[in-house]
Structure formats: C-alpha cells, structure tokens
Amino acid sequence: MPEIVQIGPFRPQLVEPEKFTLTVENNKIIDADIELGYVHRGIEKLFTTKTYLQNLALAERICGICSGIHTLAYAQTTEGVIDVQVPDRARYLRTIYMEIERLHSHYLWFGVLAHSLHDTEAFLKIMGEREKVQDLLEFLTGNRMNYLINTIGGVRRDLNEKKIQRIRSVLKDMKPLSDHIMTLLDDNGRFTKKTKGVGILRKERALAVGAVGPVLRGSGIKSDARKDDPYAAYGELDWEVITEKDCDVRAKSLVRARETYESMKMINQAIDNLPKGDIVGELGDPLVTESIGRVEAPRGELFYYIKSNGTNIPERVKVRTPSFANDFTIIEMMRGDYLQNARLIIESIDPCFACTDRVTIINAKTGKKRLAKLE
Amino acid sequence: MAQPKISVYRFMAAGCNGCDVQILECLVPRYKLADLGVGVVFTPEEANVLAVTGGVNIKTMEELKSIYEKLQPPKLVVAVGNCALTKEIFDKGYSMVGPPDKIIPVNFYISGCPPRPQAIVTSIAKALGAKLEEKEDYWATPEEYRGRHEFDSEKCIGCGACAQVCSSDAIELTENNGKRTVKVDYGHCSYCAFCQDECPEDAIKLTREYHLVFTDRKQASVTTDVDMQKCSSCGAYFMPQRQLKRALERTEEKVAEYKRYHDYLKETIGVCLSCRRKISNIKKAKQLLSRLSVTALQK
Ligand code: SF4
Ligand code: SF4
C-alpha cells in the first residue's frame, strides 16, 4: 500500500528549507514532489529598486555559499548594458577569487556529506581544515562570506605579495585534504560504500530534466560554462573539465573532489601569469538594451538576464540559479530508489545542504500519520 | 557525554544561508563551543535556545511561532545576522514579514552579515558569563575586515553621499535644532563598505570590531553630528556648514582665474534652494553666470 512521506520543509541540518513529498511503496520511492518558496525574499523585484552598484550586494545575498559567483555573474551581465572595458588583471583576479570560493564550497559539501553519513570523524576533519580557506577569504576580501569582491568593470581589492604568499601556502595545506577525500571515495573508501549505486541519474535523463554542474558532469556529460563559454581568465588557463561515468552519488562526489585539484591548478597558474595594471575599468553610462550572462558556479551554470532602460536602475533582472535547475533531478533520482537513501539524494545535488532526521509518514489510504527516522 | 547545558536549535527563516553556514562552522573544535557546554540539537523539543537566521517570510512565519512554543525553558532566542535583526537588504521584499522579533520575543541580537563564528561563540560565552581563551591568530580580524562603522566627526561634512550609495538603506540623515545627524544603523547594514568607498572626505570607516551582540537591536548604531548653515536670505537651516565650505572651496578651485567674482559666488552659494528660486535671486545668479562667461569670451 503506497504511503506518503513528507520530508521537510524545516530540516535542521539543512541550510535551506524545502518540502519534499514522496510516495513510497515497500520502502521504494514511486514518486516525489517538491514545494519551494520557504526562502523566497522577492529578490527579482528588489533588483528593480536599487542602482546597478547597490544590486551587487543584493545579488551576493541570493546565496551565501556561492555569494562571490553571483556578483561575478551579475557584474558580467551588467557589463553588457554599461560600456566598460574590464582590465586583464581584473579578469585574472576574478578567476583566482572565484576558484578559492569553489574550494570552500566543495569542501563544505563534503563536510555535509560526511555529516549525513554519520561520519563525525570525517566531518570534523573536513570542516576543520576548511577553516583555512575561510580565513584566507576573510584575509583577502574582508569577510568570510558575502565578500563583495567583484564589481562592475573589475574587482574591488587587489592582491599584493603578502596575499599571494598566503594563497600559495593555504593551497599547499589544502592538497592533503583533497587527497584525504579521494581516499574516502576510492574503491574501499568509507564514503564509497554508502554512495555507490545510489541516486542514479542516467545521461539521457540528466539532459532531459536540465541538470547542471557536477550533477550533470557526474552523469558523464562534459559541460562547463568555464570551458564552453569562457569568461574571466578561464580561456587562457590550462585545465580540464572533470566528468565521471557512473551517474550515482559517488560519481557526483568524485567530480567535486577532482575539481578541487583543478581549482588549485588554476589559481596557481593565474597567480603565475597575473598581468599588471588596473583592477577596475572606467564605467560608461547604461545603454537602453538587454544582456545575458552565464558563469559556472560551484553548483553548476548560473544565469542572469538584465534589461536596461538607460537609467541607473535596471528595469528587469532575472536569475536562474543552479540549485533550481538541479532540484528536478532529485525527483528523477528518487524514483525507484529506497526511502533510506532519500536524504543522501537530496544532498547529492548540493542544494546547499542536508536533510532532516525525522519525517512524517502519512498512509495515503487512511490518512494516519506516524513519525519515522530517516537515516 | 553529559547533557549540554545549552542545546541550540537552528531555524532558517528566509536569509541567504550565510549565517547558517557560520553556525555550522561553530561546531569545528577550534571555536571551543563544546567547552562552553553548548550542543546543537535537531528538534525544537530538545532545545532551550533557538538561533534564528533570516528575516522571516510569509511561509516561515507560522513555523517560527510553533517552534518557539515547543522550546524548553528558559526559551532563549538569539537572532543571528542582520537579516534576523532588521531584514537588512531584503527589508522591502514583498514576501518578508519579519524581522523575527515582530513575531516572537528575541533576547539577543548578533550583528554581522554574516557574523563570524568567532562572534557567535564569544557572544554565547558573554551571555553565559564564561571566559574564552582567544590566543590563536584566527580570533583577531584581518586588516581589511569590514566590521562596525566609525565616524571621524572632525571630517564628516554631512553631505549624505554614504546614505545615497548605501545598498541596504542603513544610513539615515535627520535634522534637528540646527544640527544634522548622520546615523548608521549597522543592524541594517550589509557591510558592503560602499559608504567607505564613496565618502568624499574619508569620514566613515568600517573598523575591525566584530563583537557586536546586543539585547536591543536599536543599540546597533553609530552617529555623528554636523552644524547646519542658515540661509543668508531667509534664515532657515539648509545645508551643513562644512559641506557648504567644501562646496565653495571646490567651486572656487574650478573658477580660480575669476578671483574678483569669488565674493559674489559666496553670496549666491549661501542661499537656500527655495530662496535661490526667487525672481530677484535668479536675476543675481544669471548676472554672475553671464559675467563669468563674458570674461571667458574676452580671453
Ligand atoms: S545577515 Fe547576511 S549573511 Fe546572514 S542571512 Fe542575512 S544576508 Fe545572509
Ligand atoms: S557598509 Fe555602509 S553602504 Fe554598505 S550597507 Fe553598511 S552602511 Fe550601507
């Protein structure tokens, strides 16, 4: 007899509340539904009440974890409606800052993965080491999150010798952490046992539901805005798009783990080849026009659209975030999987966090509720 | 393990999740949360402290109330981050109904966007009357940290450029008794530092101070005063004295070669906007302009 299981909306370990309603038979998930809106703040409307500059701070607060990349996407799109030349040095600095952000975001995800696998040891190790990246970001930008480092036409803070030294030394410290994560994910690793074969998202289905980022790459599709549509300095650096064939949660994890090495490689290269010059270009006036921009956030493709009417306030700003695109893959992955894997599957897209320990199970026929523990 | 003295339940009511991640980071051993006897729990029934982040939207409001009901005594509520103090940058969002203290009683407010884990942990220690060892490097803020604001009251000319550029409407100008007050409500601030960047006089700075915990969110503000200038024609206060002085200096600099009209310039600039629009004054101003341009033509 099918049962209705409700997960969320408020899941304590999860950053963002979201409600999932699953139909379950014999512990197998037959169908799933998602309800959004628990963090709706009316941002797209707010965009049209602030100036282009002020909107940087707003764009940043769409998501705290990938805050930097939101300002970059917004700034690059705005650069399409405002006449400005971004200096070369700024393009390289943007790459450096954004890859450091990807490191912290990916490590955070592994921390949360460990948490949901009840692996306290791994959780503390990953989160503890990750603090070095947070300290670095604070040192470079003045804040641990919402750093507001990108601006229209460039970046707001430059790197000096001292900062470069610090970046290099933190990167050196982070390599062992990535190595450690790789061992947790190798054939006999602790993470592998619980993630292999879980949450399968086949290649065709990944494309059909519009997956992006590590979720898509974990299903074997080579797609990355940094390569397909190079921005900042990505077109000038030597790096690879990481893909995995297995389509399960482990594959998605491996993509993220291997990407941390690519990020480190890119940061080092960008520092080595850092051009000299200004860090922000001279701004012209806004034109009456439209513009789109896409970047690769830690969670996948992030898309902005801006319509300008020639004033200093945009007429329309539309944002398509990667987590929104990936949300629908959750339904896809859940169908046919087991109830006990539900939490892991939700997490696998890195929706910004985990899930609840408790779910309500409602018998679809009798309407009776009972509480169950979700592992 | 002994039952922790304080068990915290975290509730996210429509913020950006930055604060939530900081709370999660507090669990890292280096922040010594466990030393304080603080643990995190996953149901409101087990908790006696509620940490709420975000400015509360329509969908989270009812849930917030019901969670508050379920808390164990002493039912302390800590608002973490500026969204939870004032809704911050989302203040005018159509779906926002907070801040939390409009819906449930709040005992402590921690300002920041997001507050560092260090700030959260030291606030808890302070509330408990406990002492934390803060010897290691990471307790201090780096040089470029963007913390609480500070005015240089000698330098501020009261022009309001900071209020114009502020991303979160955190700066307010008010006039009273011949004084203009510039007030930064940093509980409403996104710590973007645009004010610092745009201030023409370098009078506002974001300091390295991050211990920003309050029992009343109105305490989270800094102010400075400037004296106003009376209009030489009608006698009403119309502009801060120092701003007028700077405006005059800059204009004189621009028209440096027309020294003989500088007195005349001073007279025109010291008149308020509505007086300037009076017919007689328009005439005067026109005269000044035409004289300036005639001299320019003669050259
Ligand atoms: S206070 Fe700042 S960091 Fe915290 S939720 Fe609000 S916007 Fe995010
Ligand atoms: S830092 Fe200054 S400009 Fe930015 S929100 Fe705060 S008060 Fe406003």
Image (spheres, coloured by chain):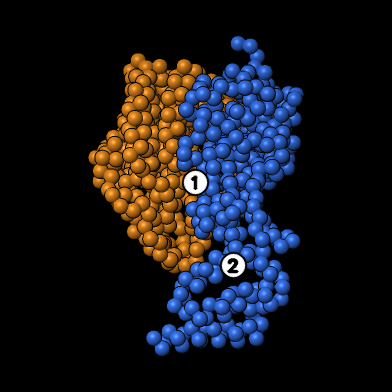
The amino acid sitting under disc 1 is Glu
- x%, y% of residue A4? 60, 29
Quadrant for the C terminus of chain B in the image: bottom left
Q: Which chain is represented by blue in the image?
A: B
Q: Look at the numbered disc 2 and say if its residue's Cβ is closer than 8 Å to ligand 2.
A: no
- x%, y% of residue B219? 69, 42
- Rounded to the nearest angstrom, the CA distance separating label 1 from label 2 is 37 Å
Camera-side residue of B92 and A152: A152
Residue A178 visible here? no
Residue under mark 1: which chain is it in?
Answer: A
Q: Secondary structure at mark 1?
A: helix
- Residue at which label 2 appears: B244
The amino acid sitting under disc 2 is Leu
- Give the foreground label among 1 and 2: 2
**Residue A347 drawn above or below residue A234:** above
Residue under mark 2: which chain is it in?
Answer: B
Quadrant for the N terminus of chain B in the image: top right
Q: Which chain is represented by orange in the image?
A: A
Camera-side residue of A354 and B173: B173
| Residue A60: mark | 1
